[in-house]
Image (spheres, helix red, strand yellow):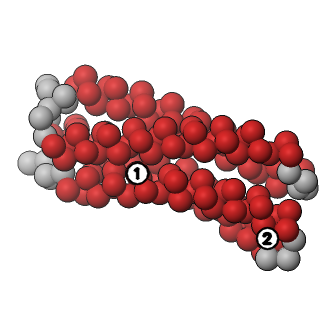
């Protein structure tokens, strides 16, 4: 890969974010059967977990391609790929936010929902830390000529 340290920070952080997505989806999937929730809420969380895993797969594949082309591609091609990766991660984080927001009202009055809400919120926080690092590194890349 290029020796560009900012690009290296980006790829490392984006990979970490993707792996956090997979890890947290697996954890949520493990906990979900033991939770007493309406089918609609379980379905929404199941769909979120599927999205987290799919995004992880897409991002890791794209990072591998970015690694392969970083020596020979133009800066504009690299920047476009970086933007696409950030967009994929952000869209899934937004989907997670929708689930958090939908669970929040019930979590304030029902302990079962509070535990589920907390599970999803903690997972979101785990994902946001590496996402923020990746986003900052993406923003710090020099613009393409």
Res 133 → quadrant: bottom left
Who is closer to the viewer here, 139 or 126?
126
Q: Label 2 to label 1, Cα distance in Å? A: 27 Å
Q: Is residue 36 left or right of residue 86?
A: right
- How many residues crowd around disc 1 within 10 Å: few (fewer than 14), some, or many (20 or more)? many
The N terminus - image quarter: top left
Q: Secondary structure at mark 1?
A: helix
Residue at 86% across, 46% down: 34
Who is closer to the viewer here, 96 or 107?
107
**Res 92 seen here:** yes
Please say if 11 is above or below 107. Answer: above
Q: Residue furthest top?
A: 68
Sooner in the amino-acid sequence: mark 2 or mark 1:
2
Q: Position of residue 25 (x, y in %)?
A: 64, 42
Q: Residue furthest left?
A: 145
**Res 46 seen here:** no
Q: Is residue 87 left or right of residue 79?
A: right
Q: Position of residue 52 (x, y in %)?
A: 59, 42
Residue at 54% across, 43% down: 21
Who is closer to the viewer here, 142 or 6?
6
Residue 70's tag is none
- Total labels: the figure holds 2
Residue at 78% across, 67% down: 114
- How many residues crowd around disc 2 within 10 Å: few (fewer than 14), some, or many (20 or more)? some
- The residue labelled by disc 1 is 130
- The residue labelled by disc 2 is 107
């Amino acid at each position: 890969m290029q020796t560009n340290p900012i690009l290296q920070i980006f790829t490392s952080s984006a990979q970490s974010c993707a792996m956090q997505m997979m890890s947290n989806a697996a954890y949520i999937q493990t906990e979900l059967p033991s939770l007493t929730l309406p089918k609609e809420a379980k379905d929404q969380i199941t769909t979120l977990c599927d999205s987290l895993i799919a995004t992880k797969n897409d991002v890791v594949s794209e990072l591998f391609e970015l690694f392969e082309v970083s020596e020979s591609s133009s800066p504009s091609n690299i920047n476009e790929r970086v933007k696409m990766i950030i967009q994929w991660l952000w869209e899934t984080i937004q989907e997670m936010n929708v689930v958090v927001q939908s669970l929040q009202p019930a979590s304030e009055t029902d302990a079962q929902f509070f535990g589920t809400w907390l599970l999803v919120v903690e997972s979101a926080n785990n994902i946001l830390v590496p996402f923020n690092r990746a986003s900052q590194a993406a923003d710090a890349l020099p613009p393409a000529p």
